[in-house]
Amino acid sequence: MYVDTISAIATPLGEGGIGIVRLSGPASAQIASALFRRGPRLRPVDVARLDSHRLYYGYLVNPQDERVVDEVLLVRMAAPRSYTREEVVEISCHGGPLVVREVLRLTLAAGARPAAPGEFTLRAFLNGRIDLAQAEAVMAVVSARTPDSLQLAVDELRGRLVGRLGPARAALIDALAYLDAAADFPEDEVPPLDLEATLARAEAALAEVVAGARLGRLYREGLQIAIVGRPNVGKSSLLNALLRADRAIVSDIAGTTRDVIVESINLRGIPATLVDTAGIADTEDVIERLGIARSRQALERAGLAIFVLDGSLPPTADDYQVAELLRDRVLRDGQDRLVVVLNKRDLPARYDHAEIRALLPGAPVVELSTHTGQGIDQLEAALADRLIAHAGEAAAPALVTLRQQQALARALESVRQARAALGDGVPLDLVAVDVRAALLAVGEITGEQVSETILDEIFSRFCIGK
Ligand SMILES: Nc1nc2c(ncn2[C@@H]2O[C@H](COP(=O)(O)OP(=O)(O)OP(=O)(O)O)[C@@H](O)[C@H]2O)c(=O)[nH]1
Ligand SMILES: [Mg+2]
């Protein structure tokens, strides 16, 4: 197994209060003993004999010449009560990049090997402290972009996804046990089981996790929201209003925005990326046309579009052109991908743009003014609503990675196939093939069934020191 000892800087490099170098593996204490001294006389210490989980004050020296490198706090976490379940030593020094690097260098010189990205967490998984979903949640905690995403990641860290898969897994095991017994023993010796009902239970349980997963991905990864419309309707003003900052240039000259502007916002807990685009119009201006081409690309990539109309002016040919584009490119994929905004409602002249809205049936309409701020709250609510509708039904969100989502989808597909096969009167040993496939897919999420390649894939995305 893992007999070598790894070392890495566990805190971000930069000037900070403290910087931590972490060691994990059987030689951790021995390596730390080579470098750690206590008291004014720099007494050597046998770190292996220090109390576990207790901080010790002392000095870190270069053992070549006993020169003091820094004043440090050292903690030893005896196996198995540590992050990795191995012997762990953490050395907290002052948080300057030079100091921290020097401490790392000395641990390496004393016999440690530099840790690969995610290797501490990989060891925690391999040593059975956490399941694979929890290991992946560690990364989600580190990279969470809104407090809600963080909360989901922390729930996951406590094993929520695997817990939720419990009922599906239990039903699949029941079904498979029955199928295997039915293949091996005469009918009257096999305890009866309503196979169809058991598979239906597995399917329902999996479907619920899949729905929650879709919502969870939204909280984790967010979605792109493109702001589109003809020039001068107030798209950039709307971006600024949603960001509550003067990010984009606003002017009364049509064609002010010529490139896409991308900014992140926290939309009722969902991390979203707002994309302000160049106004779409018939124009001869070369740069403006390039900008318009980018607007169309942004629209292709966006999960959601805000169509801005100037509510103080009658509709123009360009408004119609954008509406048709949205009808063909966005509404085609579902009504929940579009919100229409009637802007400039602070002005006395009012147009309802009914014919244009009729081109976009089902899209909610929000009236607002980016100047007074009236209606911005309603727009935020409408957007959050759309985002959640886009993700699926109101399941409790679960945090999943793409890998987990794919495994879930395969599990669900296999259960559906098993049920269909059963309905069609296919021989039971063939039904068993699908049930077994579903169970394997579920096992990939918990980590009971994973290949070396998948593990490499997962842990290489971590930062070093995690
Ligand atoms: N009265 C009023 N004027 C607004 C409102 N929102 C924007 N405007 C004005 O409309 C003009 C155009 O605003 P922008 O935000 O630059 O419009 P845009 O859609 O980004 O325009 P392009 O980048 O050229 O496509 C500016 O003079 C804004 O001050 C509003 O709610 N009320
Ligand atoms: Mg603009």
Image (spheres, rainbow, N blue to C red):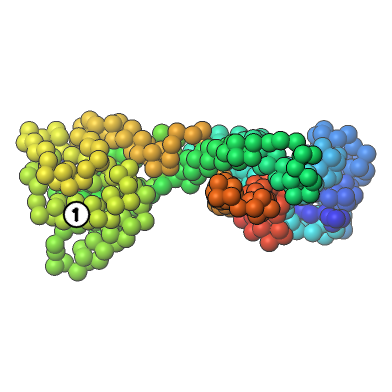
The local secondary structure at tag 1 comes to helix
Q: Is residue 332 visible?
A: yes
242 or 33: which is nearer to us?
242
Residue at image x 60%, y 36%? 197
Q: Position of residue 395 (x, y in %)?
A: 49, 34
Q: What's the residue type where badge 1 is placed?
A: Glu
373 or 36: which is nearer to us?
373
Residue at image x 93%, y 39%? 49
Q: Quadrant of residue 324?
A: bottom left
Q: Is residue 253 visible?
A: no
Q: Position of residue 47 (x, y in %)?
A: 89, 42
Q: Where does the N terminus fall, quadrant-wise?
A: bottom right
Q: Position of residue 309 (x, y in %)?
A: 17, 44
Residue at image x 32%, y 60%? 297
112 or 131: which is nearer to us?
131
Q: In the picture provided, is 88 more to the left or to the right than 349? A: right
Asked if the residue at label 1 sits under 8 Å from ligand 1, the reply is no
Q: Position of residue 36 (x, y in %)?
A: 85, 46
15 or 452: which is nearer to us?
452
Residue at image x 33%, y 57%? 300
Using the image, determine if residue 287 lies above or below residue 405.
Answer: below
The residue wearing badge 1 is 324
